[in-house]
Amino acid sequence: MTRRRLVRLGLLALAGTALALAWPSAAAAQDLYRVTMRAPGAWGLASDCQSGTGYVLAAGTMRSTGGTLKADGQVLEPDGTLGPPLFLDLVTDVSWTRKYDADRGLAGTFNGCFGETSGPNGNHGALFIDFGSRKGKSFVHFTWHFEYYVTPGNVIREHFTLTSADIPFPAWNGAGVSGRVRGMFDIGYYLKEGRKVLSGYESITGGAGRSFEFDLIIEKVQ
């Protein structure tokens, strides 16, 4: 990825983090959607971490130029029960390190199920799937904040963020939509201690990113 692209992705990720920590879960006026990701290529995403479920439950908000699906593991099913926790199967060869242990140690590879963290320093994180159009061509954009370590008062915050380019995809009009996602993704690392941001969404691939491929299926349930 170019430096310009990485800066743009970082700004989008920063905006998404504010929403992840502040935007409430599905309100009564929002529509509900089941989001399924499957059949990843060499690298990609799948929603197969929860046995018997296989989907992520998201709240949808439409705009004049598209819309946003937001999942945070706290969205309620139509019957009022809590939807599945937010875990995704991240299939890559990308290695990671961190300063604070969020129950996975301090190093590893992003190849397996990642997402919510538990305990007093845990956080649900959030997945944003944004749809838009440019010059008459529709696209989808992913921002996923995950593997948080957060202390009370947000004194320390450490997490990773997966962000995509704007990837060509069928337009979403609030109903169901599906298609094959093929495009560039990258993973950023964020660390703040006190008032000082020590690492602000720095690419852990050196800006190279990875070319992901997987099926995305969105079904409206309410």
Image: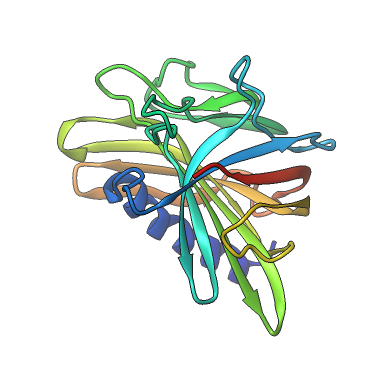
Residue at image location 38% in from the left, 32% down from the top: 124
Report which quarter residue 1 is drawn in: bottom right
Measured as percent of width and height from the top left, residue 211 is found at 78, 49
Number of marks present in the image shown = 0
Residue at image location 69% in from the left, 38% down from the top: 37
Q: In this view, which residue lies farthest toward the bottom?
A: 135
For the residue pair 155 and 179, the one nearer the viewer reads as 179
Q: Is residue 113 left or right of residue 210?
A: left
Q: In this view, which residue lies farthest toward the right?
A: 42
Report which quarter residue 92 is drawn in: top right
Measured as percent of width and height from the top left, residue 186 is found at 63, 49
Q: Is residue 166 above or below residue 190?
A: below
Q: Is residue 156 above or below residue 7?
A: above
Q: In this view, which residue lies farthest toward the left?
A: 153
For the residue pair 14 and 216, the one nearer the viewer reads as 216
Measured as percent of width and height from the top left, residue 77 is found at 44, 32
Residue at image location 52% in from the left, 64% down from the top: 67
Measured as percent of width and height from the top left, residue 117 is found at 40, 23
Q: Is residue 104 above or below residue 135?
A: above
For the residue pair 91 and 23, the one nearer the viewer reads as 23
Q: How is the image coloured?
A: rainbow
Q: Is residue 1 left or right of residue 115?
A: right
Residue at image location 55% in from the left, 34% down from the top: 56
